[in-house]
Amino acid sequence: MVRFRHTVLWIVCMLLAAGTSAQEKQEAQDTSKGKVGGAVPVVSFKEDVFPIIRKHCLPCHAEESANPSELALDNYKLLKQGGKHGEAVLAGKPAGSPLVGKLAEKPPFGDRMPLNSRKKVKEGKAKWLTEEDVKTIATWVSQGAKDN
């Protein structure tokens, strides 16, 4: 009888362990499919962030452009290098990253980006990044601002 209980206990433990490994396998699959912790999609610099930068930022922040901040965003290396005001991105800290802050309605310094003429801003015709684009960049920074 004791041996039977040990066998049943062993079977229960094995089933619980098998259930945990199945859960771990599912979490690994979620991560490989672009999810962190099974919920938040992984944001890629090359596929998600750089297209936003190319469209909205490079007209002024290309390496060969003269811009007051001296921040070039042509590629990941230049972005990480920063500009006259220091680092543009603080990995894991979107609230402290100037790149994210400059996209906000009230940036920590200077004008909101992308730059619009004062006339367009006054007339309400300014074009800013969408909330989704800003969230994409902020999420990428919060996930470590990787060159992925």
Image (tube, rainbow, N blue to C red):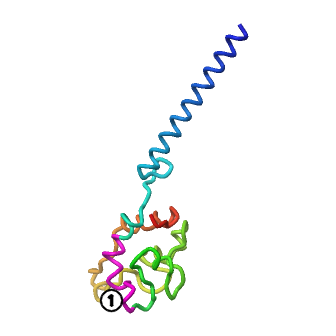
Residue extending farthest top = 1
Residue at image location 41% in from the left, 49% down from the top? 33
Q: Label 1, secondary structure: give it.
A: helix
Residue at image location 49% in from the left, 85% down from the top? 83
- 89 on left or right of 119: right
- Looking at the picture, tell me which residue is in the foreground, 131 or 13: 13
- Name the image quarter holding residue 58: bottom left
- Name the image quarter holding residue 134: bottom left
Examine the structure image and report whether residue 52 is included in the region drawn in magenta: yes
The residue under label 1 is 118
Amino acid, disc 1 = Arg
Which residues fall within the magenta stretch? Answer: 51-66
Picture quarter with the N terminus: top right
26 over 143 or under it: above or below: above
- 8 on left or right of 71: right
Q: Which percent across, then down, holds residue 23? A: 51, 37
17 over 138 or under it: above or below: above
- Looking at the picture, tell me which residue is in the foreground, 92 or 121: 92
